[in-house]
Structures are given as structure tokens and as C-alpha cells.
Amino acid sequence: MLTKQDRLEAMRRFKYPKTKGQERLRYHALLLVSDGHDAEQVAALLYVDPTSVARWVALYAERGLDALKNNPLWGGEHGQRRLTSEQLTRLGTLLDEEAMPGTEVGSGWTVKAVVALVQERFSVAYSQRGMRKILHRLRFSSQRGRALYIKRTAEEQARFEAETYEILNELARSGRRCVPLAGDQTRVYLEGTVGKRWSRVGKQPRIADRSRTKFAENLYGAEHLGTGEEVAPFSIDFQDAGATVEWLELVKAACPRGEIVLWLDSAPHLTDPEVEEWLERNPRIRVIRFPKYTPEENPKEATWKALKDDVSHHRFHPSKQSLSDAIDGFYQKARRHTVNFLQRFGYIWDGGRIHAMPSPA
């Protein structure tokens, strides 16, 4: 049954110590059948079912030796895919709709917990390695978590959206020139921060560090919600009301024409009475507050992420000047970012003015 070449290859695979046990069993059965034993005899010798032997022989006859290899998408303890297609679909739904014990829905699962869930709900045992293959098949991936601020409220979200719709509608109707900006502040430390990096398997990236000095550059900045450009980047040693006012003066100077609509969060140094008094004296700047505890609402956060990836992640700065130079270098690249904040509310900025987006046909 086996050709001379296939027999040699089957023997090689059977004897190769790294061949998986279940795969080696199939080659062994094929060699015995080729030596003249029938399926029942081979099954008795190998303690398997005769129908399995017959199926392996048929697979070889149809597609050759490679048909007896383990499928890389299989994930059972012995290389078999134990869950049916319907069960796999059901597992994906369970992982989306239920929570790992002791956690909240949407907070993710450990492989160990998924193995236990499959054992409990489907009475099927998987190794953790096999379960990782199943999770990849279900389009799950291992991801870093993101904080969810439990103090956020629906009322704050509704207030923010109502104010945003109101001012965008007003500007679109009046046709007044305006500059829409999203502002924020952050810190970048001398010590390198940890981020995802590609590295050779088994060679975990290492980051130079020293005793924590806690020195940081405090950065203010704004992103133009029409062009995606950086506006009025500002670095200082601290964040307080005085620094905020100094930055607002820079924003005003950088945008000499038109009304400035500035979305900000409610950090204490941004809502200090000194800042509020300055805003009252400068009515050309209108401020809308993002809802509390919702940093994902602010498109400026994405630019901070890009800056830290370039300047801070896996990079140690030996001096304040080194950190300052790196930050300056980032801004010298004249970066633009894709922003869809206004489109989310049904408006665009063009030619210095806000316009309502055309209704879909």
C-alpha cells in the first residue's frame, strides 16, 4: 500500500522523538497495515478502534502522509479538536456575556479560567496550550487592560453631549469663524516606561532605570479638531492654575482669528478660580468640559500616547536636558493626527468654520 518513498518517510516520522503521540500512532498503524495486517489486527495491537484505523488508511489514500498530521487549529489534550462548531460559537458567546469568577463582565479571562469553564459547561478537557489555539480561532487575543472609572455618570455624559451639540449647531448656523481644540496635560518622566515591543522569543526587552527621581516634564497641549495639528505645546516643571493660565495665553496667541472652542477635562488646575476668572476676561475662548472620569472622550489622549511611545517607552533619559530635547524632537516632526471628534456629532470644520455634515441619501 505504501510506496517505498512513503514507507521510509512514515518510518522516519514514527521514530522521530518530537512527533506528537497521536500523530505517531497513525503512522504506526499505517506501517502495520502496509505490512499485511488488517484493520482489526492493527486496532487490537494499538488499542484503538478499527474504524479509526480504516479512516487513517483512507486519509492516506486520498491525500498522502501529510493528511495524518495534527491540524494546527486543533486544541485537545491529544491533538483533537474536541468542541464542535456549535460549541465553539457558544463558547465565544459565553466569554462575551459572562464574567470570569470574581470579576466584572468585559474585564477579560485567563486561559486557566477558560479551561475550567469549558470543562464545566461542555465536559471537555483542554490543556492551556490547546485552549490558546481555540481562543485565537475565536478571534480573542491577549491584551493589556484599560481602566474603567466607576465614578462616571450618565448625567455627566448627557450634559457634555448636549453642550457640544448646542455650540456646534450654533456655530454652524451663524457661520462665525472658529478654532475647535481638544486640550489636555500629561507628565513624562526621566525613567523609561513600559510599552509593547517586538523582541526575539526568549529575550524579554530590558529597560535602563535608576532610583526613582520622580522628575517629570509637565506638558500642556491642544489638538486641532479640524486639521489634527498640534497647537500650543507647552512644557513646565509643574501643573497649577498659574501654569494653566500661561498655557491659555499661548493658545490665544496661536489662534489669533476667530472664536476658540476648547474642550477640557475638570482637573483641579483647569477649574481653579484663577483659571475661571481668566476665562471670564477672555470670552473669545469658550470651554466645554468633558464628562468626569472619561479620558477616552478626549482625542488629545491619543497624541499623548504617540508622544510617550516615541519619547518615554523603553527609553531612559540620563538628564532633564535629554528628556526636554526628546520632547522637542517629537514636536519638530510636525505630526498630524486623524480626528473624528466633530464627525461623531454630525459636523466638520472647513475653511475656518463649522459645517453640518450632509445627510446620507
Image (cartoon, helix red, strand yellow):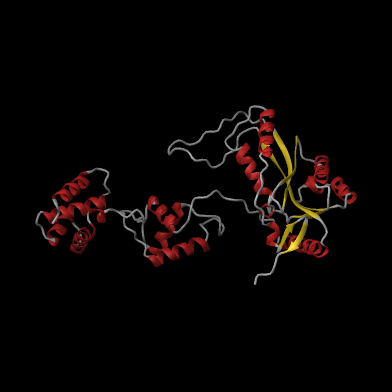
Q: Is residue 153 above or below residue 188?
A: below
Give the quarter of the figure containing the N terminus: bottom left
Residue sitting farthest toward the right = 281
Residue drawn at point x = 42 percent, y = 52 percent: 132
Q: Is residue 213 above or below residue 262?
A: above
Residue 74 left/right relative to 251: left
Residue 162 left/right relative to 52: right
> In the depicted view, which residue is nearer to us: 226 or 205?
226
Residue 346 left/right relative to 115: right
Residue drawn at point x = 76 percent, y = 56 percent: 351
> In the depicted view, which residue is nearer to us: 355 or 342?
355
Residue 170 left/right relative to 133: right
Residue drawn at point x = 31 percent, y = 57 percent: 80
* Image location (x, y in percent) of residue 8: 16, 47
Q: Is residue 147 above or below residue 214?
A: below
Give the quarter of the figure containing the C terminus: bottom right
* Image location (x, y in percent) of residue 283: 88, 52
Image-quadrant location for residue 188? top right
> In the depicted view, which residue is nearer to us: 257 or 95?
257
Residue sitting farthest toward the bottom = 361
